[in-house]
Image: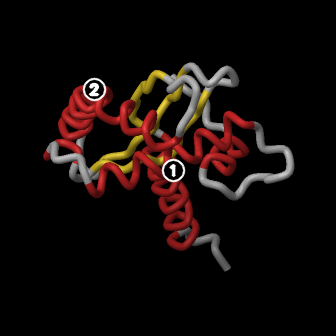
Amino acid sequence: MSVFDPKQTLDSIGIGDKREQKRSSRVAEAIRNELSILLISKVGDPRLNSASISRVDVTDDLSLARIFFTVLGDKKERREAEKGFQRASGFMRSHIAKTLNLRFTPVLQFQYDSVADKVAELDEIFKEIADERQSSPDNT
């Protein structure tokens, strides 16, 4: 289970501090861009139609890339997308190798990004609190 880190999320979507961006962060950004384009243009697996790449974390030695994805739908569609990503991982890794011209291409590890679910859950809690405040008789 990964811990939500706002700085890491900002870095992965390209709005973090550019001055101290490590090579692994730049490679992660490049991988995210390439895989996003690849999902739209070349991947024909119907299980990945509603999937999108939310962020990528690459280890400092560039040996492993954790690709976080989101899916529109329920848990069943999420499991299907995980299977689709596992099946397409070799194709995606070879595409990354050809496109990014790295000495060693990182191993791609796909996992569902639960941050979107947590944000939706918090949003619902805040909405309930706001509704309770509006309907409370003490509100003047």
Compare residues 3 and 11 and report the one nearer the observer: 11
Determine whether, in the image, residue 66 is placed left or right of residue 58: left
**In the image, residue 47 above or below residue 102:** below
Compare residues 121 and 15 and report the one nearer the observer: 15
**In the image, residue 44 above or below residue 95:** below
**In the image, residue 105 above or below residue 126:** above
Helix, strand or loop at mark 2:
helix
Other-residue count near label 2 (Cα within 10 Å), few / some / many at <14 / 14–19 / ≥20? some
Q: Residue at x 22, y 34 (%)?
A: 84
Q: Residue at x 66, y 43 (%)?
A: 26
Q: Residue at x 40, y 30 (%)?
A: 111
Helix, strand or loop at mark 1:
helix
Q: Quadrant of residue 82?
A: top left
Determine whether, in the image, residue 85 is placed left or right of residue 116: left
Q: Quadrant of residue 97?
A: top left
* Residue type (three-letter) at the residue carrying disc 2: Gln
Q: Which residue is mark 1?
A: 119
Q: Residue at x 74, y 53 (%)?
A: 16
Q: Residue furthest right?
A: 19
Other-residue count near label 1 (Cα within 10 Å), few / some / many at <14 / 14–19 / ≥20? few
Compare residues 97 and 36 and report the one nearer the observer: 97
Q: Which residue is mark 2?
A: 86
* Residue type (three-letter) at the residue carrying disc 1: Val
x, y (%) of residue 51? Answer: 30, 48
Residue at mark 1 to residue at mark 2: CA–CA distance: 26 Å
| First in sequence: mark 1 vs mark 2 | 2
User: How are the colours assigned in the image?
Assistant: secondary structure
